[in-house]
Image (tube, rainbow, N blue to C red):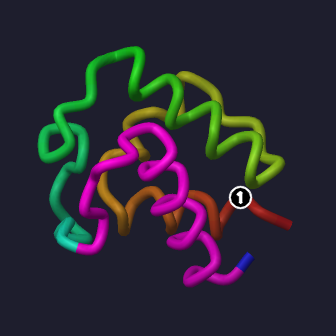
C-alpha cells in the first residue's frame, strides 16, 4: 500500500468516527486523539474501521503507533502487502 493511500484510509476512518471533523486541518505530526477529543470508544471504533478498510489485523500492542496522521499512515503502509 502506498503512503498516500494509507493516509486516505486514515482520514476516511477519522471522518467516519467523527463526521464533523475537519481532517484537513489536522497537523500530520500532532496527536489527533486530543485534537478530535477522542474517548476510548471513539479510538476503538477508529481502529476497527482501519482494520476493516485495510484488511489488516491491528492488535492492542500496535495502538501506540496510531497517534498521528503520519505515524498511522506509515504503520498501515509498512504492514500492508
63 relative position to 55: left or right: left
Which quadrant holds residue 37? top left
Q: Residue at x 23, y 49 (%)?
A: 32
33 versus 76 height, above or below: above
In reply to whether residue 71 is colored magenta, the answer given is no
Q: Quarter of the image holding residue 1? A: bottom right
Q: Quadrant of the C terminus?
A: bottom right
Residue 74 position in % (x across, y down): 51, 67
Q: Residue at x 51, y 59 (%)?
A: 10
Q: Which residues are magenta?
A: 2-24
Q: Is residue 27 above or below residue 21?
A: below
> Which residue: 76% across, 37% down?
57
Q: Counting other residues with Cα less than 10 Å from the Cα at mark 1, is it few (<14), some (14-19), or many (20 or more)?
A: few
| On screen, residue 7 above or below 43 | below
Q: Position of residue 75 (x, y in %)?
A: 55, 58
Q: Nearer the viewer, residue 52 or 76?
A: 52
Residue 30 position in % (x across, y down): 16, 59
Q: Tell me what residue is drawn at x 53 percent, y 59 percent.
A: 12
Residue 15 image point, x, y percent: 44, 52
In front here: 9 or 73?
Answer: 9
Which structural element holds mark 1? helix
User: Label 1, on which residue?
Assistant: 79
Our reading of the magenta stretch's main secondary structure is helix
Amino acid at each position: 500500500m502506498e503512503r498516500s493511500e494509507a493516509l486516505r484510509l486514515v482520514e476516511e476512518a477519522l471522518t467516519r468516527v467523527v463526521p464533523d471533523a475537519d481532517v484537513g486541518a489536522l497537523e500530520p505530526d500532532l496527536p489527533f486523539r486530543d485534537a478530535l477529543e477522542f474517548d476510548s470508544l471513539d479510538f476503538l471504533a477508529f481502529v476497527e474501521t482501519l482494520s476493516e478498510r485495510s484488511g489488516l489485523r491491528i492488535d492492542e500492542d500496535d495502538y501506540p503507533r496510531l497517534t498521528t496522521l503520519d505515524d498511522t499512515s506509515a504503520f498501515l503502509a509498512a504492514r500492508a502487502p
